[in-house]
Amino acid sequence: MSSCVGTMSIGVRIPIIEKGDNLAQIAADSVISASKEIKVPIENGDVICVAESVVARAEGNYVTVDDIAREVSEKFGNNEIALVHPVLSMNRFSMILRGICRGAKGGVILALSLPADEFGNHILAEEKYLSSPICGYRIVSEKFFRANTERKDTIHPFTGIDYIEYYKSIAKEENCKMMVVFTNKPATVLDLSKHVLCCDIRTRELTKNLLMKNGAATVYSLDEICNVPNQTTGFNARYGLLGSNKADDEKLKLLPRNPEFVTSMIQYHIYDKTEKTVEVIAYSDFPVKGIAYTKGLYGKIKIASLADLMSAGGRKTQMVWVKGY
């Protein structure tokens, strides 16, 4: 008889995780307790999804705005820095921008893409952009942009924020000179500055190569900031600032340094207590879906679709137990 029940996703409550906590043990014990509570057995092939945020919290993997500022200053010196194609986000980029502005001794040029960032957050609605004179230009000044758009059309429909003004306000608070331009061709910023920080995510390597071929003097991307191991601050050797989140007004939480260890240890602890082999994934929605997962998941699933099970009602949970995937 065939089963009428398909994939089942069970949210698992875990305690508030602090720096130094044994997350692997806590996660395994929580799943086992949940299994007993709802009388659903843990089985071979079940998948445990844990949010990267709690992994990084257990590691204490944080950097401050001053840490970012210091590194930006070391890499770019007194030069004006062109920031190419950042995302529009209060949580993801605003704190990074604050650190950049604090460390940019020569000021910044903020180059935004039109009509939206790479994740579809619009500066201007598609139809408004296509019907505007700004559509035909390689690079557009803020003055020309404002002269050919209405203020109400630059307000983000969900957050209610004009990101142009919001990012300018951050620069002003940091006493940093900022010029805002709009372009979909990254190399055009080299007419304004030869020193560039690529703030795009998926296309960062392509953007860097393009800029270097066109004569850039200094080029870095966000994964090259806060990526060097050290004893005093957080870091992520692979992703740097990519995937960071605002923790408070002066601190950001980076992606975890060693999520592979945590996923393997959760698998070990559950097997040790149940003799069942589960698979484990450390989930992030940015910049990649699965930042670490156990070997049984390699090449067998679409990580993005599994990771989507972490979302319940539009809100990401800290840990999910998936059955029948």
Image (cartoon, rainbow, N blue to C red):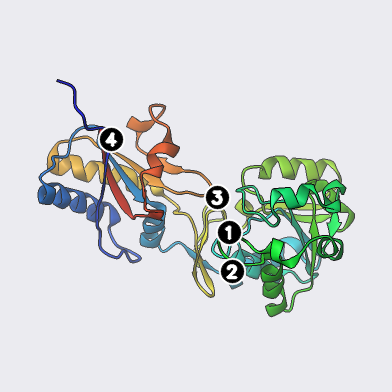
Distance from disc 4 to disc 3, alpha carbons, whole Å, reads 32 Å
First in residue order: circle 2 vs circle 1: 2
Q: Position of residue 78 (x, y in %)?
A: 80, 68
Q: Nearer the viewer, mark 4 or mark 3?
A: 4
Q: Residues within 10 Å of mark 3 (few under 14, many from 20)?
A: many
Q: Which residue was labeled with disc 2?
A: 67
Q: Which residue was labeled with disc 3?
A: 239
Q: Quadrant of the C terminus?
A: top left
Q: Residues within 10 Å of mark 2 (few under 14, many from 20)?
A: many
Foreground residue among 322 and 16: 322
Image-based side of 139 in relation to 49, left or right: right
First in residue order: circle 2 vs circle 4: 4
- Using the image, determine if residue 47 lies above or below residue 114: above
Foreground residue among 190 and 227: 190
Image-based side of 277 in relation to 186, left or right: left
Identify residue type, mark 1: Cys
Distance from disc 2 to disc 1, alpha carbons, whole Å, reads 8 Å
Q: Which mark is residue 226?
A: 1
First in residue order: circle 2 vs circle 3: 2
Q: Which residue was labeled with disc 4?
A: 7
Identify residue type, mark 2: Asp
Badge 2 vs badge 1, beta-carbon distance below 8 Å: yes
